[in-house]
Amino acid sequence: MPMLVAVGLMLNSFSEPAQNASLRGNTYSHHDTILVQKAQVSKKNKIKLYPNASHEVLFFSAAGEEGKVYQLFLFDLDGKLVKQVNIRNRQTTVLNRIAKGSYLFEVFSDDERIENGQVIVK
């Protein structure tokens, strides 16, 4: 019988953060960590994908040829498109509300893949 009580307490302690997350309106705590690993890097374009200091959001910026438009696609590991963002040359945008997990990203301009890699939110 004490074993059942201990298991019940363990289940409640594991489910509590998920409940708190839903009560906070799907905001993410400052204890998250965002890691970006690039697999392909452009030599002609300067693409930046980086977290803010508290790892709450992810910034996406691009610098290259004047007039270019850059598209960032963020996919979950099942291949489902999670976020898509378009920016112009020398602009920066913020991606927020990224759930914990592993993602693949690709950056395109003029239908050419410029960079790709992985984003991990812990």
Image (cartoon, grey):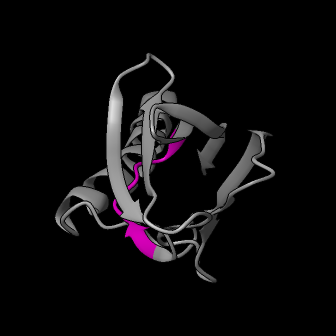
Q: Can residue 107 be seen in this view?
A: yes
Measuring from the top left, give residue 89's x and y in whole percent: 48, 69
Viewer-proximal residue among 105 and 26: 105
The image shows residue 40, relative to residue 72, as above or below, that is above
Along the horizontal axis of the image, is 50 left or right of 73? Answer: right
**Residue 114, located in which quarter of the rendered image?**
top right
Which residue occupies 29% across, 62% down?
20
Q: Residue at x 81, y 51 (%)?
A: 43
Tally the marks: 0
* 48 left or right, relative to 24: right
Residue in the image at 63% along x and 66% along y: 50
The image shows residue 105, relative to residue 51, as above or below, that is above
In this picture, residue 61 sits left or right of residue 45: left
Q: Does the magenta stretch include residue 64?
A: no
**Residue 52 vertical position relative to residue 78 in the rendered view, above or below:** below
Residue 19 spot, x, y in % from top left: 26, 54
**Magenta stretch?**
92-101
Q: In the image, what residue occupies the spot 69% across and 55% down?
A: 35
| Picture coordinates of residue 29, whole percent (x, y) | 45, 71
Between 83 and 26, the one lying in front of the other is 83
Which of the two residues, 65 or 60, is positioned nearer the viewer here? 65
- Residue 60 in percent (x, y) is at 51, 65
Describe residue 27's horizontal placement relative to residue 13 as left or right: left
Q: Does the magenta stretch include residue 98?
A: yes
- Furthest residue toward top: 78
Residue furthest front in the image? 66
Quick check: can you spot residue 104? no
What is the quadrant of the N terminus in the image?
A: top left
